[in-house]
Amino acid sequence: MLPNADAVDAYAANLVIQQVNAKPDSVLTLPTGNTPIGMYELIVASNQQGIVDLSRTTVFNLDEYHPINPDSPDSYASYMQRHLIGHVSVGEWHITH
């Protein structure tokens, strides 16, 4: 068991980073919501520090509100832009609209 939310964020971010470093063209299915925000912050920081490069990954998000404009600040597309996609380069990004 991990002692706190920061430890969970670090553990999850490290799993993603290890996967991408081992297989740069990984296909990732990533969550939305409040829980993964810390994980995304750590992945972005690691990317900026040159620890991980997501530029060959394919990212899928399986959830989205319907019908909602992807540009709406309440959409999961906007969420991913705010927390990950807008800060790192990924090979492909797919989200249900």
Image: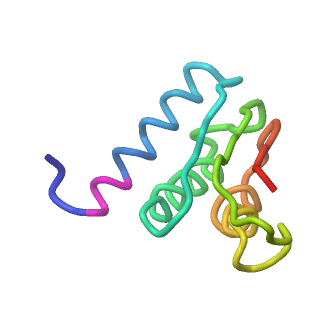
Q: Is residue 34 left or right of residue 76?
A: left
Magenta stretch, residue numbers: 5-9
How many labels were placed on the picture?
0
Q: Residue at x 43, y 35 (%)?
A: 15
Could you tell me which quadrant the C terminus lies in?
Answer: bottom right
Residue 3: percent from the left, percent from the top?
Answer: 15, 57
Residue 51 appears in which quarter of the rendering?
top right
- Camera-nearest residue between 79 and 17: 79
- Camera-nearest residue between 41 and 1: 1
Q: Residue at x 66, y 48 (%)?
A: 61
Residue 77: percent from the left, percent from the top?
Answer: 75, 62
Q: Is residue 45 left or right of residue 96?
A: left
Residue 58 appears in which quarter of the rendering?
top right
- Camera-nearest residue between 20 and 28: 28
- Camera-nearest residue between 10 and 67: 67
Placement of 10 over or under 14, stated as above or below: below
Q: Is residue 55 magenta?
A: no
Q: Residue at x 50, y 64 (%)?
A: 37
Determine the residue located farthest toward the front in the rendered image. 67
Placement of 68 over or under 1, stated as above or below: below
Q: Residue at x 53, y 62 (%)?
A: 41
Placement of 64 over or under 74, stated as above or below: above
Residue 70: percent from the left, percent from the top?
Answer: 83, 67
Determine the residue located farthest toward the bottom in the rendered image. 73
Colouring scheme applied when the structure was drawn: rainbow
Residue 31: percent from the left, percent from the top?
Answer: 54, 52
The overriding secondary structure of the stretch rendered in magenta is: helix
